[in-house]
Image (cartoon, helix red, strand yellow):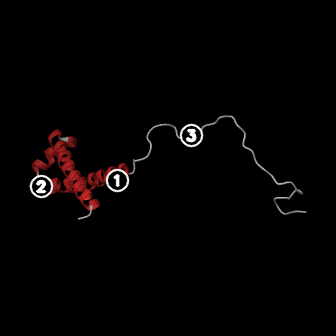
Amino acid sequence: MPGLVKLYIRQVITGFGLSALFVGMLLWANVANLGALIGASDMGWVAVVMLWVFNGIVFAGVQFAIVIMRLGSDGPTGGRRAPRLNGARARVRVAAGKAVDPLGRK
């Protein structure tokens, strides 16, 4: 199996694990009375599964995006990456001859 596919599967598993932790904390903290609503309903497990799956999709996508963006960080780190100015003037050589209008007029 290619390395990128292994990386993707690992990040999806991590994202869904984070989602399970997040949904568990939502229910434990009873945010917006969500835990009581789900506990009082006979179909509360459907809400829990939906919360887990939809948050898992988001968290897995974010996990994979973070890992992919960090792959290309092999270059220099830090600094301003601004050109150094030393005060020297650039020399431009111009061949001697008659002047030429850049717009082509005579």
Q: Circle 3 sits in a helix, a strand or a loop, which is it?
A: loop
| Sequence-first disc among 2 and 3 | 2
Disc 1: which residue: 68
Disc 2: which residue: 45
Q: Nearer the viewer, residue 105 or 74?
A: 74
Q: Are marks 2 and 3 in contact (CB under 8 Å)?
A: no
Q: Which circle marks residue 55 in the picture?
A: none
Left/right placement of residue 19 relative to residue 79 reads left
Give the mark toward the camera: 2 or 3.
3
Three-letter code for the amino acid on which mark 3 is drawn: Ala
Q: Residue at x 26, y 62 (%)?
A: 5
Q: Which circle marks residue 82 in the picture?
A: 3
Q: Circle 1 sits in a helix, a strand or a loop, which is it?
A: helix
| Sequence-first disc among 3 and 1 | 1
Residue 21 vertical position relative to residue 60 in the rendered view, above or below: above
Residue 69 vertical position relative to residue 4 in the rendered view, above or below: above
Q: Circle 2 sits in a helix, a strand or a loop, which is it?
A: helix
Q: Residue at x 17, y 39 (%)?
A: 29
